[in-house]
Amino acid sequence: MLGATLALSLVAAMPATQAQTKTQPITVPELVARLLPSVVSIQAQHTPGANSRATPRRGSPFEEYFKRYFDRNPGRRRGSAMGSGFVIDKAGYIVTNHHVIANATRVRVIFSDGRKLAAKIVGKDRRADLALLKVESKTPLAALPWGNSDKMLVGQDVIAIGNPFGLSSTVTKGIISARSRFLPNMGRISASGFVDFLQTDAAINKGNSGGPLFNLKGEVIGINTAIYSRVGTNVGIAFAVPSNLAKPIVEQLRKFGRTRRGWLGVHIREVGADVAKTIGLARPTGAIVVNVFPGSPAAAAGLLAGDVILTFNGQTVPNSRKLPQIVAATEVGKAVDVVVWRKSKGRMTFQVKLGELEKATLSKKKGGKGALPDGAGAILGMQLSPMTPKLKRQYQIASDVGVVVVNVARGSEAARKGIRPGHVILELDLVKVKSPVDVRKLLVKARKDRKRAVLVLLQRGQDRNFVSLRIAN
């Protein structure tokens, strides 16, 4: 694409009419010159020791690099963090990453012409690793337009501008190398299941965080956030928060000073092929509910554990990763239709009035009404026991319900499906169980009904999941 643009420019390097000049495509150097004034360097000052919490956790891709860096520069850990950002409004609003300004006591913005302005933190969002700043400028600032990240195709050219290693106004170029990258627990990158990243091979390094990723129209289609590297510098794999996800979050930060995400109130898992077959679903799709939080919108609407959410507010739910993004982007308080697949009943539609995720999370911390809950014979290769105080202490089980797995036979179906001592069986075929006798009775019924497998709801700690276990008839 770039080659074609340059070729046209060279061919046209002869006397041309004014009309021909107007239709000539803009070159990359011309585009960059237009964009540079809107890209800034972010300097975040920290109190002594505050920035140490931003160091990546042990075993992360960034650990060794930062260890060497801070060993050589011990004062930097307690001094300042450098990053990038970009202007989105001439009134002085600037977007960057949350991790660039996290724990900052003072933030300063440095423009490409050398101007330095103090910045106020308007709002920040740890979940999507975004933050919004505001500066007061005597002259209007050049704002950058948002682009449509959904239209970016793998292989399309992109340009990144930022301040790697403090080297301001650095430009790199590459392509979109992948879409919808899910990065759970990557170092201390804040972004979670709410973000499907764009992947690029444009050179991104420490200091590029928060900077814009452009298409060749000069539109921001991503915010550069993370790299994957075993040496701490660019190896051709970098990740950006898509603009279509970032834009509404930034608008909420500007309007409310925080995010207001939709909340359904369910714990979900991926639908495996064996689970889909067990519940009569034609193919693995959607997100299976493994827990409905008491007092949640889902509970009020009548959703149950074992329901597979197929569509939400008219949008197809292809997998469990996509559902949190769809729900979070939906307006708080809005009544939406949720289509589920329920075993033995098929498709069902429920209307749910969404709550607010941030309020539900705060309630959890305070232990309020809307708090998110925690979660003897050989049967199917498992040795089961009723819940006892001794087993609760041994396996650190928080609840009083369910049947405890105390042993699993080698080579059994349960072992192959990952069931281990300490797992708690809460339900079998969507029926709650309180003792091994309950489990055995339900298995007898399943065999009489000529079922080939049963659906088991397991819990360990706060983690719940459905597992399909084959049974012999």
Image: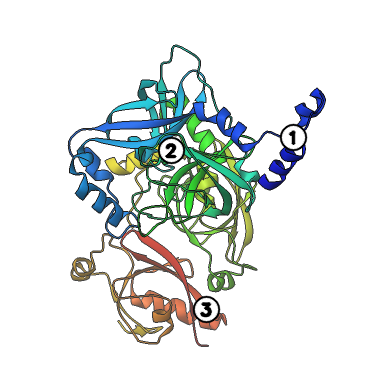
> Picture coordinates of residue 207 (x, y %)?
38, 41
Of pointers 2 and 3, the one earlier in the residue sequence: 2
Residue 210's mark? 2
Q: For the residue labelled by badge 2, is the local secondary structure a helix, a strand or a loop?
A: loop
Of pointers 1 and 3, the one earlier in the residue sequence: 1
> Picture coordinates of residue 312 (x, y %)?
59, 48
- Which circle, 1 or 3, is nearer the viewer? 1
Judging depth in this view, the residue of 179 and 203 nearest the camera is 203
Disc 2/disc 3 C-alpha distance (Å): 49 Å
Disc 1/disc 3 C-alpha distance (Å): 73 Å
Provide the residue designation for mark 1: 13
Q: For the residue labelled by badge 1, is the local secondary structure a helix, a strand or a loop?
A: loop
Residue kind at label 1, given as amino acid type: Ala
Along the horizontal axis of the image, is 403 left or right of 350? left
Judging depth in this view, the residue of 307 and 126 nearest the camera is 126
Disc 2/disc 1 C-alpha distance (Å): 38 Å
